[in-house]
Amino acid sequence: MTDGRTETRQQTQAWRALRFFNYYRITLSIFLTILGASPYPTQTIGSDNPLLFLLVSSGYLLFSFASAFTLYRQRPTITSQVQLQSLGDVVALTLLIHASGGLSSGLGILLAVAVAGDALLMEGRLAYLLAASATLAVLTEQSIRELMGFVKGSSYTEAGLLGTGLFATAVLARLLAQRVLESEALAHRRGIDLADLTELNAHIIQQMDAGVMVVTASGHVRLLNTAAWNLLGMPVHTTQRNLYYLCPELAQQVKRWHTDPGMEPVVFRPIPEGNEVLPRFSALIQTAGTELLITLEDASALAEQAQQMKLAALGRLTASIAHEIRNPLGAVSHAAQLLEEAHELEDANRRLTRIICDQTRRLNSIIENVLFLSRRELACLENIPLAPLLEETVASLRSSPGFASSTIITVSIVPQGLTVRFDMLQIRQVLDNLCHNALRHAHRNDTTLHLRLEAATTPEGAWLDVSDNGPGVPREAVHQIFEPFFTTRRDGTGLGLYLARELCEANLARLTYLTLPDGGSRFRIRFARNLGKGITLASET
């Protein structure tokens, strides 16, 4: 395919070169015709036979226009046209030389120009044949003039020198044409290699996990890979190609960096439910600093990776400790229960035994969660209709111990037949953790607790919100609520939200916390849009 394109390109250039040379032929023939028809004859041009000079120059002009027509139609083939036109040049110019008094007229130089131009367009041996034909024509013309007695003495030396020059011209023209073709082929190959390298670099940049952007001094985004687009929250203003539309906060940092290149980049969150992003700036030296290379890293992912490494080691340790603690803890709990049942036990001691029982149950809950994390099985994804799942969740909440009858629970699903892919047991556990977390933390004396379960779908995928109208999470604790063993309650284990997020990630979903402007808390489960090619995770039935 590449050879075919190269051949086509060479053919196109050859046709163009032949047309340009024909423009020269037309110009020359017009000039010679004007000289032949002029009432003021020159000293040498057409001096021997003015009528023949006028007829030949006029015919040469008609031949040039006919060549222009055939070149426009590109018929016959370019090889045939080059041969025919070169033969016409030799015949016409030889006759013009004869009508002007032979080689002494100085028109032999026109024959050299014609041989050089035609030889550039011919293939190797044809160029030498053209030079031989032109030399033979000159020698024949010289012989005819000598036989007819037009010259005194022999002028074969001059004709021989011109023939030698014609051969030299043909040889040099072919060498030059060959060198040009080789240089052009090399440049074409280098261009293909450069295009392939550019395409490879673009593909690598698009597949990088880190976001890459190239921004001009005016804020125009020249390059934006997929990772950067995702980290910036998949902005819809990509047609604008301006950083101030894509991410105003990043644009402000770029502006400050131009003022102070030594400034430290600041972690920011492009959208409220998105991850934190750490930008890094560096000027492109090749563009004299007018363009800026921006790399974006998922600060949340880096923090999570470090956290996961620590938790992996901690998990192995705590799992082994949990196994060792479980048996003696069970013995302590059983002994406390037996002690509490003793009739002679005083009230103060009975209260102490209840404390022992409560704390042992709390410790056992922590151990159960730790062991669950250590032996967690792979998620078994299946299509789950959200409507019956949320109805079941609400019914379970209403029948749970300690549920206040005044609590209002509302469910909203758009569309009603929305389905997601998740492990059924695990999504039940996630919803149970989130809903009971809201019931435990959202109570306020001055208002009725309102728990909302809302689900909807967008082009980016389906989401499910669990929100309440409670006091919300304190601002200083927002970044810690998903860390293991972090809790704001004395009787909490600190593993509920951490476990819920781990289960979501195991099902290719994301659990995030959103602060509501009018107070309260919102936990959002954003389900992945697809799982591999052709598998949709969120759909409408």
Image: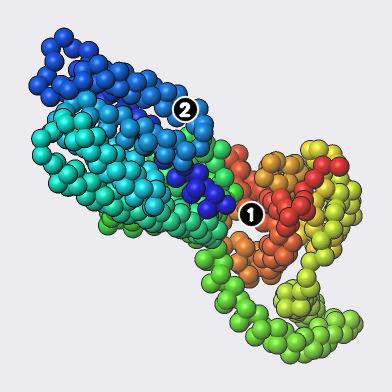
Q: Is residue 317 above or below residue 428?
A: below
Report the residue at 21% width, 50% height from top: 164
Using the image, tell me which numbered label, if any, was put on residue 512.
Answer: 1
Q: Is residue 157 above or below residue 366?
A: above
Q: Is residue 385 above or below residue 400?
A: above
Q: Residue furthest top?
A: 39
Q: Is residue 223 visible?
A: yes
Report the side of 389 relative to 206 (left or right).
right
The span from disc 1 to disc 2 (Cα, nearest Å) is 74 Å
| Quadrant of the drawing holding the C terminus | top right
Mark sitting earlier along the chain (1/2): 2
Residue 93 at x, y = what percent? 27, 31
Report the residue at 50% width, 48% height from top: 7
Secondary structure at numbered mark 2: helix
Total tally of numbered discs in the picture: 2
Residue labelled with disc 2? 70
The amino acid pointed to by label 2 is: Thr
